[in-house]
Amino acid sequence: MLEQSIIQLRGFRNIHDGGKITGFQIPVRLNYYRGIWLSQLRPAQVTVDGHTYTENEICWNIGGNIYTQQELCHRSDVHWNNLDVATLIINKDGGLIPGLHEVEVYYQFSASYLPPRIDLNFFSRPDSRKMVLVR
Amino acid sequence: MLEQSIIQLRGFRNIHDGGKITGFQIPVRLNYYRGIWLSQLRPAQVTVDGHTYTENEICWNIGGNIYTQQELCHRSDVHWNNLDVATLIINKDGGLIPGLHEVEVYYQFSASYLPPRIDLNFFSRPDSRKMVLVR
Amino acid sequence: MTTKTHQEKKPYRGVSLYCYAEELGFTMTMEDCFADMYDMGATGLEILANGHIENYPNPTDEWLENWFSLLKKYEIEPVEYGHWVDSRLVPGQQLSTKDSYDMLVKDIKLASKLGFSVMRTKLGVVDEILTPVPNWQEFIEMALPVAEEYNVKMCPELHQPTPLKSAMVDEYVEFIERTGTKHFGLNIDFGVFQSPEGRLQIPGVDNPPSAPEDMIALLPYTYACHAKFTHMTEDFIDPTHPYDEIIKILIQEKWDGCLLSEYEGGNRSVPGYTSDQLRKQHVMMRRLLGEI
Amino acid sequence: MTTKTHQEKKPYRGVSLYCYAEELGFTMTMEDCFADMYDMGATGLEILANGHIENYPNPTDEWLENWFSLLKKYEIEPVEYGHWVDSRLVPGQQLSTKDSYDMLVKDIKLASKLGFSVMRTKLGVVDEILTPVPNWQEFIEMALPVAEEYNVKMCPELHQPTPLKSAMVDEYVEFIERTGTKHFGLNIDFGVFQSPEGRLQIPGVDNPPSAPEDMIALLPYTYACHAKFTHMTEDFIDPTHPYDEIIKILIQEKWDGCLLSEYEGGNRSVPGYTSDQLRKQHVMMRRLLGEI
Ligand SMILES: [Mn+2]
Ligand SMILES: [Mn+2]
């Protein structure tokens, strides 16, 4: 089941590749009552403990497939259902230290049936959460 | 999914038999972290809008089978899982009037690993809820 | 499916799953929503395709099998299929007529496969008063033969701040009359009748309530309605939408479509709150429809 | 399954689904619990049979298939199967030795079928200090050959107010030594070490903490432990259970069983609260186990 927070707890962990940690991941839900096509999604910005990641430092795992942020606007053929959790992937040797982290996530998405003035910002909102990473 | 309240909303309605209403039903969950055998369950008492129903005025629908309250103590072969909702059935011609009702439910159950002094009342607790019946 | 409800030529009751947006997936499953509807005798269903259909637009056979078995178990008729023509699908572009048509066709086929007869077709807009994209007539007209083949009716939603008496609604009606189609129509959202205190405040836009009798001329083209509400009292009254007048007119006009509840009030993420509000609205509707 | 965790002859980490009692079925599915464990690298699982097994005691083939596929997906080893010998099963009677044996056998077979090797065998009690029913040795002894055949270990739980140094625990140890069995043992709940302020208050019963070193004599018979906790600070400290001493002793004694988290603090029905507390405890345990 989903949590109300946009940033979800389940799935927050480092990415283990064999014995090595190659990065970390942050699961997020779509704060919207319906799903969207990936070209409606805009690149996310992630801040962990004051350090900000943007653009090509972040990839999206949606439905088990990985997309770069530059790729999103070209993928009007891929759908992200609002009941499915997506995962933001950040490459970082060694990942995050086990313990408490302040995580902030912001991304926008487009809703064409709203006036252009509020298209991107009516539903989109930033979220932050203090979360424990165990491994 | 379950609601935290012992009295559950989904399933609260009159019992329709063809064009006739023969009674009403109140769904309840087991306020316990495990399931029990029916012989661990004690007869329930139900009060709706100040009128109390007891003993043979109530039947239990557990797992799709109907048990009289007298029968419970003999059914140590039937298990009620705490993640499954049971339904209290009360026969009453015409059922309840569509609208708001004050519903109270109390039943006890036995937990043999607790001191006999608190066996029946450590987990059992009465519950009440104002609920809307539509039909 | 539940054709009995149609025989009397009067409105029947349903629910849009939109109501459960902050519970479905959090504290309720789709089956829980259906069970809730069953308690209310709400036999008509609206879903939002891009969200309620797992793996949309390609549901698995397993999902489809479960879908039909749940409809049968809870005696539910799929009425309205909510979908979008996302005109700003790609940043900086307006969706072409051909691409809009393709998007429509994909949804028409899926709606029909799932058993729906009405589609709530949300068009992209170009301004504050929700004027639809300039090419809407082109791609809708292209899709009419497909809608006919699959036996569904595409219906934009008439929603505040658009009054029922307005150039935009006139344009929809003219399109219907010009084409003579039975596969494009209207969905009236009763929010258009909401009293002034609760209405949307849009800078520079006047947003007065429409009068319930303004529906009358539109009912022949209206294939579903959104029974919008934001608060029901414990006396089963909606203080901000004139349901007594609305339902009186629908009965008088022998309109026999589905009233799909749309709860848009507060506390939607509080478990059980929406269900309680829905039940109160359905007690009200049963009274006004003469069911009790 | 995850045998690597055993090779070093030191404790490994797990979770009892008991922790999620006010979320599982409300705001979490069993798969959500497993996913949470996966994030923690908690590879050992305890379930409570009468509750977590759908249609207990007769799970369907479909449920079993899903069970094994979830274990595999989340790299989880079924460690401890919580079950009960309900001595007051029938009102006014004490469960006979034969009926107690039958109840045990049913659970032994199901535990084994689900892949568990340890059973937390909750016995009925007769008084305030949790003295087990007088016939416990009879039915446990009757069941030993069945436990051997199905390769499971029945373990009553040592829980406050029972001190580790007590006649009751002595009796369990004597039983083990007399029978020489490897299929009956102990589950130590670390709540026995809890500091005085948080302990159960029982009228007329003294309930002093045991000392962590009191475990040493029992560890050869201890097949799982409940890593009980009621509050973790943001500094990853459990202020009321001496985990540094407890884990130091377990490592020193080369005890290689599973530490099954049991959260019994507040806010368990607040979504996410238990997961957060569990994660904090597992960061603490990783530190004390030298994993980080
Ligand atoms: Mn609407
Ligand atoms: Mn314990």
Image: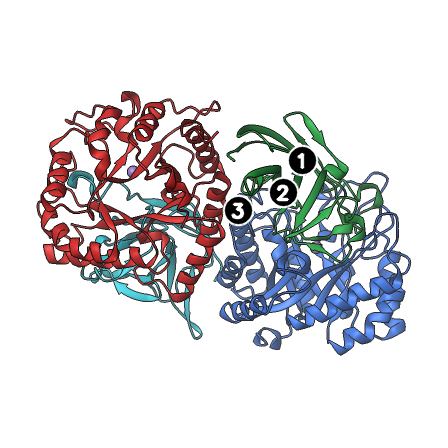
Chain colours: A cyan, B green, C red, D blue
Does dot 2 land on a helix, a strand or a loop? Answer: strand
Residue B97: image quadrant is top right
Of residues A31 and B29, the one nearer the viewer is B29
Q: Name the mark on residue B28.
A: 2
Tell me whether circle 3 and circle 1 mark residues in contact (CB < 8 Å): no
Q: Indicate the chain on which mark 1 is placed.
A: B
Quarter of the render that holds ligand 2: bottom right
Q: CA distance from mark 3 to mark 1?
A: 29 Å
Residue C124: horizontal and vertical position, in percent?
17, 45
Does dot 3 land on a helix, a strand or a loop? Answer: helix
Of residues C62 and B66, the one nearer the viewer is B66
As drawn, is D285 to the left or to the right of C281?
Answer: right
Q: Amino acid at mark 1?
A: Val
Q: CA distance from mark 2 to mark 1?
A: 8 Å
Residue tagged 3: D273
As drawn, is C147 to the left or to the right of B6?
Answer: left
Q: Name the mark on residue B105.
A: 1
Q: Name the mark on residue C122.
A: none
Residue at 21%, 34% (x, y): give it: C218
Residue B40: horizontal and vertical position, in percent?
77, 49
Mark 1 neighbour density, 10 Å: few (under 14) some (14–19) many (20 or more): many
Tally the numbered discs.
3
- In the image, is residue D165 above or below residue D145? above
